[in-house]
Amino acid sequence: MQAEAGPVADSFPQEGPSRRILRDETLLVLGLSLGASGVSALISFIGSATKPGGLKDQAATLNASAAPGRPWLDLAWQLFGITTSLVPVLLVAHFLLREGSGLRALGFDRTRPWPDLGRGAAIAAVIGSSGIAFYLAARGLGFNLTVVPEALPEVWWKYPVLVLSALQNAILEEVIVVGYLLRRLHQLGWTPGAALVASSVLRGSYHLYQGIGGFIGNMVMGVVFVYLYRRWGRVGPLVVAHSLLDIGAFVGYALLAGKVDWLPTA
C-alpha cells in the first residue's frame, strides 16, 4: 500500500511557478546583480555630470587595487570580488535546475565548444575595432569619461587577475542580461521587441558610469547580442566574445598605456 504524502511533500506545488513568482524571482536576481549595478552607475554618472569640468577630464577606473602596497591582501580581495560577483549566476543556475534544464537551456555548456569559440572570436573582432573608435569619438566630444581599464600594481598576479575579471564580467552579463532575462520575460508574456529593449537598456545602464558614450555604445551592443542569441539559441558565443573584448581592453591597456599617443590615460 502506497504511503500518503506527508505535509512537507504536499507543500511543493506540482505545477510550474506562477507569473508572480517568476516576476519576483527576476527582480531579486537583478537586484542582487546588474540591476543594482545600473542604479549605482546612474548615481555615479549624476555625480560626474554635476562635477565642475568636463566628463573627459574625469576618470572611471576598473580593476583598481583593493589594498595598495599589500600585494597578497590585494590578491585576496581581487579573487574574493571576482568569485562573489558570480554568485547571481549560480542562483540563476539553481532556478533553472528547478525547471529540469540548468544553464544548458541558455546555451551555456560545453556541447559546442568550437562553434562557440569561432563565432565569439568573429563577434569580438567586429565589435572591438568599432567599439574603440566609438569610445575615442565620444570622449573627444565630451560625452564620456576617460576609462582606465586597469590600475593594478606591477605584481606577478596582475595579468591572471585581469583575465579572470574579464571572464567574470562576460559570464555574469551574458548569462543574466541575455539568456536568463529574455527567457523570463518571454515566460512573463513580454513581446520580443519589448524584451530586446529591456535587455539592451539594462546593459547600457550599468555602463553609464562611463558617460553617455558608454551607455549608448553598450546599448547598441546589447541589441546585437540579443539578435545573435535568438539566432543561435546560445549565450556561449556571447560569453566568448565578451571575454575577448574585455581581455583585450584590460591587458591591452596595461601594455600600451603611456606608450601610444592615441590611448587616453587618466
Image (cartoon, helix red, strand yellow):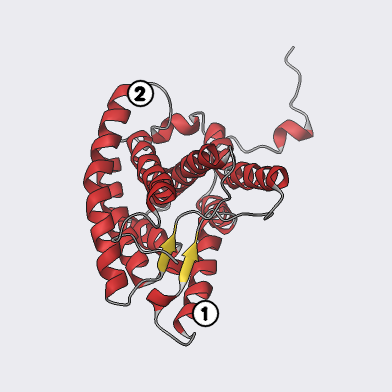
Q: Residue at x 23, y 50 (%)?
A: 129
Q: Residue at x 30, y 47 (%)?
A: 225
Q: Is residue 207 visible?
A: no
Q: Position of residue 140 (x, y in %)?
A: 28, 73
Horizontal relation, residue 238 to residue 129: left or right: right
Tell me the amino acid under the disc marked 1: Gly
Sequence order check, earlier mark of 2 and 1: 1
Q: Nearer the viewer, residue 147 or 217?
A: 147
Q: Residue at x 66, y 43 (%)?
A: 75
Tell me the amino acid under the disc marked 2: Pro
Circle 2 residue? 113
- Report the quarter where the N terminus lies: top right
Q: Is residue 120 visible?
A: yes
**Disc assigned to residue 132:** none
Q: Position of residue 153 (x, y in %)?
A: 58, 50
Circle 1 residue? 47
Q: Nearer the viewer, residue 103 or 100?
A: 103
Label 1 sits on a secondary structure element that is: helix
Q: Residues within 10 Å of mark 1 (few under 14, many from 20)?
A: few
132 w.r.t. 210: above or below? above
Q: CA distance from mark 2 to mark 1?
A: 43 Å
Horizontal relation, residue 169 to residue 242: left or right: right
Q: Residues within 10 Å of mark 2 (few under 14, many from 20)?
A: few
241 w.r.t. 218: above or below? above
